[in-house]
Amino acid sequence: MREANIGFISVGLIALLFVFSFSFLDVPNIFAQATG
């Protein structure tokens, strides 16, 4: 059971890292669009 929990947690952390990385990459584009 612990191994399964660790697997789910690791997958969740990787997903969060991807989301944060994509959001940080999109931030400059959002600022560029906001400033025109």
Image (cartoon, rainbow, N blue to C red):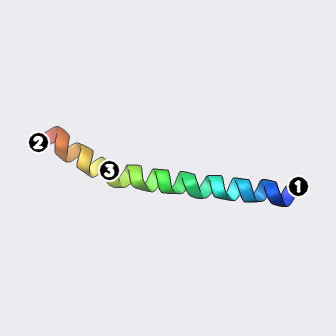
Asked if the residue at tag 3 contacts the one at tag 2, i.e. Cβ–Cβ closer than 8 Å, the answer is: no
For the residue carrying disc 1, how many other residues have a C-alpha within 10 Å: few (<14), some (14-19), or many (20+)?
Answer: few
Which badge, 2 or 3, comes first in the chain's sequence?
Answer: 3
Seen at 53% across and 56% down, the residue is 17
Seen at 44% across and 56% down, the residue is 21
User: What residue is pinned by disc 1?
Assistant: 1
For the residue carrying disc 2, how many other residues have a C-alpha within 10 Å: few (<14), some (14-19), or many (20+)?
Answer: few
* Amino acid beneath label 1: Met
Quadrant of the snapshot with the C terminus: top left
Left or right of 13? Residue 20 is left
- Indicate the secondary structure of the residue bearing disc 2: loop
* Amino acid beneath label 2: Gly
Q: Picture coordinates of residue 27 (x, y %)?
A: 31, 48
Q: CA distance from mark 2 to mark 3?
A: 15 Å
Seen at 14% across and 40% down, the residue is 35
User: What residue is pinned by disc 3?
Assistant: 26
User: What residue is pinned by disc 2?
Assistant: 36
